[in-house]
């Protein structure tokens, strides 16, 4: 199974910009590339912060761009999202019995569990898995078929990464999530957004991938603690292959428009290297 990950699209109404960038322009470029190069993917998943302010116009704009995508989409909530306006423009997106935007997607090659860590009442953008959402997670992990990989997606990481301000607005109750995992099943891979930087590693034995944002980036800065340092580094999407116990993740800098050449081409070698 192959799929593509995008995150933190931070949409605003059509024609508007956020931090000097037009998210619709960027997503359109990603959609064009995905439609052209990845015709065999099962889905495109967007791991939250779909909109920046969470207003109707932003979700309307997002829906119009995603409509052009040939592959199905799986959408998650992030701390910038608002469930009601989102629901008005994406009425087909599944919710759990409590109304949270989370679901289990069953494929032959893997089980995909999406969690809703949005806490609309939080004053600071931290995430939360309340009792209802933890109960959903428990059932999802316990009932996932044991003969295929279990992939869990959520917006907020449940651990620190060293980006100091962001560490203060991670998932507010990581121990509660871990308790559920410890008594049911460890995911084979954990995928997240929120940090706007590409980060990978291991959390309590679970390999994880944090996707770089589509919109504005967070700078590589371990010192700043009183605000989020931003940057305009280039965005990526990830292309993931899950096959026979193998998970391979490639990141594609889809806005790159520089030279493409053969490394065996002597003329190119001289042009680049001398
Ligand atoms: Fe974000």
Image: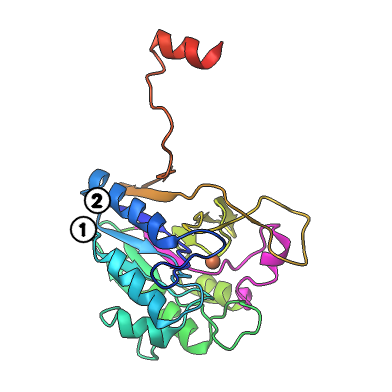
Total count of labels: 2
Task: Locate residue 44: give its quadrant.
Answer: bottom left
The residue under label 2 is: 35
The crowding category of the residue bearing disc 1, from other C-alpha atoms within 10 Å (few below 14, some 14 to 19, many at least 20), is some
Which quarter of the figure is the C terminus placed in? Answer: top right
The x and y percentages for residue 90 are 30, 79
Task: Locate residue 265: give its quadrant.
Answer: top left
164 is within the stretch colored magenta: yes
Secondary element under disc 2, as helix, strand or loop, is helix
Task: Report whether the residue tagged 1 is closer than 8 Å to ligand 1.
Answer: no
The x and y percentages for residue 207 are 51, 54
Asked if labels 2 and 1 touch by Cβ distance under 8 angstroms, the answer is yes
- Which portion, as a residue range, is magenta? 149-175
Q: Mark 1 or mark 2, which has the lower sequence index?
A: 2
Q: Nearer the viewer, residue 182 or 5?
A: 5
Task: Report whether the residue tagged 2 is closer than 8 Å to ligand 1.
Answer: no
The crowding category of the residue bearing disc 2, from other C-alpha atoms within 10 Å (few below 14, some 14 to 19, many at least 20), is some
170 is within the stretch colored magenta: yes
7 sits to left or right of 73: right
The x and y percentages for residue 66 are 29, 65
Residue drawn 44% across the image and 58% down it: 188
The residue under label 1 is: 70
């Amino acid at each position: 199974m192959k799929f593509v990950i995008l995150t933190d699209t931070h949409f605003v109404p059509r024609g508007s910009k956020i931090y000097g960038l037009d998210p619709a322009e960027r997503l359109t470029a990603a959609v064009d590339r995905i439609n052209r190069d990845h015709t065999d993917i099962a889905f495109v998943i967007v791991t939250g912060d779909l909109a920046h302010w969470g207003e109707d116009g932003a979700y309307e704009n997002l829906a119009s761009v995603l409509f052009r995508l040939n592959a199905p989409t799986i959408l998650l909530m992030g701390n910038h999202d608002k469930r009601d306006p989102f629901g008005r423009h994406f009425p087909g997106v599944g919710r759990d019995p409590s109304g949270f935007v989370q679901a289990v997607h069953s494929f032959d090659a893997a089980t995909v569990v999406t969690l809703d860590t949005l806490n609309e009442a939080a004053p600071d953008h931290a995430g939360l898995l309340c009792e209802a959402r933890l109960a959903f997670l428990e059932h999802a992990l316990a009932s996932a078929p044991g003969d295929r990989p279990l992939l869990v997606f959520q917006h907020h990481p449940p651990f620190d990464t060293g980006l100091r301000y962001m560490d203060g607005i991670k998932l507010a109750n990581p121990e509660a999530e871990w308790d559920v995992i410890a008594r049911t099943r460890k995911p084979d891979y954990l995928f997240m957004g929120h940090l706007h930087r590409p980060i990978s590693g291991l959390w309590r034995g679970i390999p994880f991938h944090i996707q770089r944002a589509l919109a504005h980036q967070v700078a590589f800065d371990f010192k700043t603690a009183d605000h989020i340092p931003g940057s305009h580094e280039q965005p990526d999407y990830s292309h993931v292959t899950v096959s026979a116990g193998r998970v391979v993740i490639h990141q594609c800098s889809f806005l790159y428009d520089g030279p493409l050449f053969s490394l065996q081409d002597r003329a190119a070698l001289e042009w680049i290297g001398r």
